[in-house]
Image (cartoon, grey):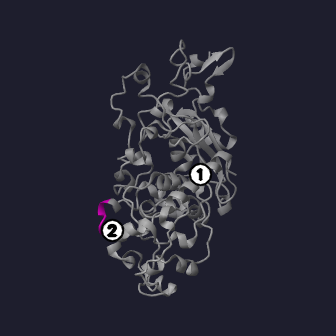
Amino acid sequence: MKSVHLILLAGVFGMLTFLMGCGDDNNTTPDPSQSVASCEGCHSNYEHLKKVADPYVDQGGGGCGGEVPHIEPYDAVYLGGTGYAEFKKSKHYEIGCVACHNGVDKTDDKKVAHSGNFIAKPSIMAQEKCGTCHAEETKGATTNIHNGNGQMRKVTQRMGLAGMQEFNLLPAGMQEGYAKNCATCHASCGECHVNRPHAGGGGLINGHAFSKKPDMVNVCVTCHKTRGGHAFLGVASGTKPDVHQTKGFDCMSCHSKQEIHGDGVQYETRYNVAQMPKCTDCHSNVGNSNTYHSMHMNDFSCNTCHSQNYNNCASCHIGGEGARITSHLDFKIGMNPIPETRSKYKFAVLRRTLSAPDSWEKFGVAQYSKFEAHPTYNYAAPHNIQKWTARTQVESGKSCYANCHIRNENGTLINKKLYLFQDDLLDWEVNATKKITVDGKLPSKWFN
C-alpha cells in the first residue's frame, strides 16, 4: 500500500495528464471529407470509434508511480482537435498510416484494417520505422537508458548472472513479472513524442501531432513522478521546488536529446552515460567560491549539501502488495556506492530502493540467489536542489559544520540521523548494504 502523499501525487499528475493531454481534442466533429472506410476516416469520426471500440481493459499499475489514469480506447486513438489539424500539415502525415502502422487502408472492416502485421506503436521498431528519416536519433534506440538497462543489470546480477546481457537467462517467471511490472515505464520514441506514456494512461496525447520537445508534465513527469518530477516540482509536504525549476528550467534544459536518445553504447547505469549533465557544466568555478566548497568539493557529491529530503521506499513484493516499506521522505549520507563511476566522491546522498530478497516470490523465485550483489541504498542525484538547505544554512554565531558534522552533546549524538549507519538497516539488508554505511569511516573525534 502506497503512502498518502504518493497516492495524492499520482492523482494530481494523473489529472494534469488527462486535462492537459486532452485539451481541445474533445472536439468530436467528424471530418466531412473522410469516409469511415479508411484509417483516417474511422479514427477521425468519434461516434463511429465509440461504436467499434473494444471494451476498456485495465492496463495494470504504473509501477512505482501508482495506478494509471483510465483512458477510454476510443479517446486513446481519436484524431481530432488542433493536434490533428497540426498533424495533417506535417511530413509525418504525408507518409500515410500504413507506412508506419502496417495494416490495410480503405476498408471499414476493423479486423481487416488491423491485419497485415499491424503495429499499434511503430516506434517499438524504431530503426525500421523511424530510422529512415531519423537515423541519428534512432541509432541508440535499443540501448539507450530508457530501456531500463541499469534495472535489468541489478535484477540479473542478484540472480548470480553476469549482467543485463544475460537477462534472457533468468527464470521465465521473472522475465514475465519484469515485463508486467517493471518495464511499464520504459519508453519508445512514440511514448515521448506522440502518445501519453503508459503511466499516464496511454493513447494519443494531441491528435497524433508529433512534439519535437516532449511536454515536461505530460511526458517526463508522468513517468518520473515519484522521484524526479516529485522533487523538481516540490510537491511533497515541507519541500520546495528545485531552484532551477523556479528559474524557468525544464528537463531538457539539462538533459540533452543526445543523452536521452543514446549514442549506440549500452551503458550499465545512467551515471555512465557519456552525455550525462554535471553540475559543473554550468557552475564551473565553484571549487573555491566559498569555504565549504574548497574543503569538500572532492569528498561530497553536490547533492549532499544542496538537496532536500528525498523520496524513499523499499522491500517491494512484485505482483503482490508492492512496497512494504512505503514511500517516505528521508535524507541519508553514506559511502559512495559507485566509486568506479563517481570516483571523485567519497560520500554521497543515498536513497532506499525497492528490491528485497523475496521480491519475485509471486513469480516462482522464493529468494534472490545473490541478493548482496548490490546494496539496498542507491547513489542518488535528487532534482530538488536549493542553495540554502538544512545543512548549508547555519545559525548566526555557530560553526559552519554545526548542521552536518556529528557531535556528542552529553551523550546524545547530534546530526547522527543524517548518516547511514548499520543500525539503520533491517536484518535482511545488512549483508548487502553494510559496506556503504559510515560505521568506522567518520572522524572518531565526532563521537567523543
The boundaries of the magenta stretch are 131-136
Which residue in the structure is indicated by mark 2? Answer: 90
> Which quarter of the figure has residue 367?
bottom right
The outermost residue toward the top is: 397
The reply to whether residue 297 is in sight is yes
Q: What residue type is labelled 2?
A: Ser
Which residue was labeled with disc 1? Answer: 12
Picture residue at 50% right of the left edge, 42% below the top: 232
Determine which of the numbered discs, if any, sits on residue 99 in the image. none
Name the residue nearer the viewer: 180 or 20: 20
Residue closest to the eye, 169 or 18: 18
Q: In this view, does 395 lie above or below 436?
A: above
Residue at screen point 51% across, 84% down: 110
- Look at the magenta stretch and give its main secondary structure: loop
How far apart are the alpha carbons under marks 1 and 2?
33 Å
Is 3 rendered above or below residue 43? above
Q: Dot 1: few (<14), some (14–19), or many (≥20) neighbours within 10 Å?
A: few
Residue 235 versus residue 316 in the image, above or below: above
Secondary structure state at the residue bearing disc 1: helix
Measured from the top left, where is residue 145 in percent x and y? 43, 54
Is residue 362 inside the magenta stretch? Answer: no
Q: Which of the two labelled residues, at mark 1 and mark 2, occupies the earlier sequence position?
A: 1
Residue neighbourhood size for the residue with mark 2, other residues' Cα within 10 Å, grouped as few (<14), some (14–19), many (≥20)? few
Percent across and percent down for residue 315 are: 65, 48
The number of callouts visible is 2
> Where's residue 172, x and y in %?
58, 67
Report the amino acid beneath label 1: Val
* For residue 250, side relative to residue 403 (left or right): left
